[in-house]
Image: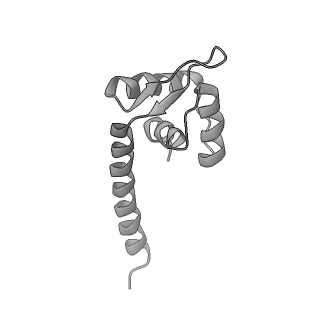
Amino acid sequence: MTDPTLLVLTSLAGGDKHGYAMMEDIATFANVSLGPGTLYGAITRLEQRGWIEPVGPRDRRQPYSITGAGREFLTQELRKMQRFSATAQQRLNPA
C-alpha cells in the first residue's frame, strides 16, 4: 500500500504526530518512504476533508490528530481492502 492518505491516517491512528514523526512511522510500518512534498500535500488534503486536525504546536513542530471522520473513513477503506484481499486469495487458491 502506497496511498499517502491511508498511510497518514494509519500513522495518526496510533497517536498524534508531526510530519517528520509520520514519515518515520510510515517508513517503519509500511516500508514506504514519503517525501516531504507528498506528505504535506496529503496533510493539506486530509485537513481540508476534516479527517485530521492540527493540535497545539510542540517544539516549533505542528502535530496532527486523526478526527472521528478520519477514523470512519479509514475503517471503511480497510473493510474494502479486506474484501479485495479475500477475493484475491480465493482466486489464487481455488478450492
Q: Is residue 41 left or right of residue 29?
A: left
Q: Is residue 82 above or below residue 41?
A: below
The x and y percentages for residue 90 are 38, 74
User: Which color scheme is applied?
Assistant: one colour
- Residue at figure coordinates x 39%, y 45% from the top left: 74
- Residue at figure coordinates x 48%, y 35% from the top left: 4
Residue found at the far top of this picture: 60
The x and y percentages for residue 42 are 45, 27
Q: Where is residue 79, by image quadrant?
A: bottom left
* Quarter that holds the C terminus: bottom left
Residue found at the far bottom of this picture: 95
Q: Is residue 70 above or below residue 30?
A: above
The x and y percentages for residue 8 are 50, 36
Q: Is residue 81 left or right of residue 12?
A: left
Q: Is residue 62 left or right of residue 70?
A: right
- Residue at figure coordinates x 39%, y 53% from the top left: 78
Q: Where is residue 93, by image quadrant?
A: bottom left
The x and y percentages for residue 91 are 38, 72
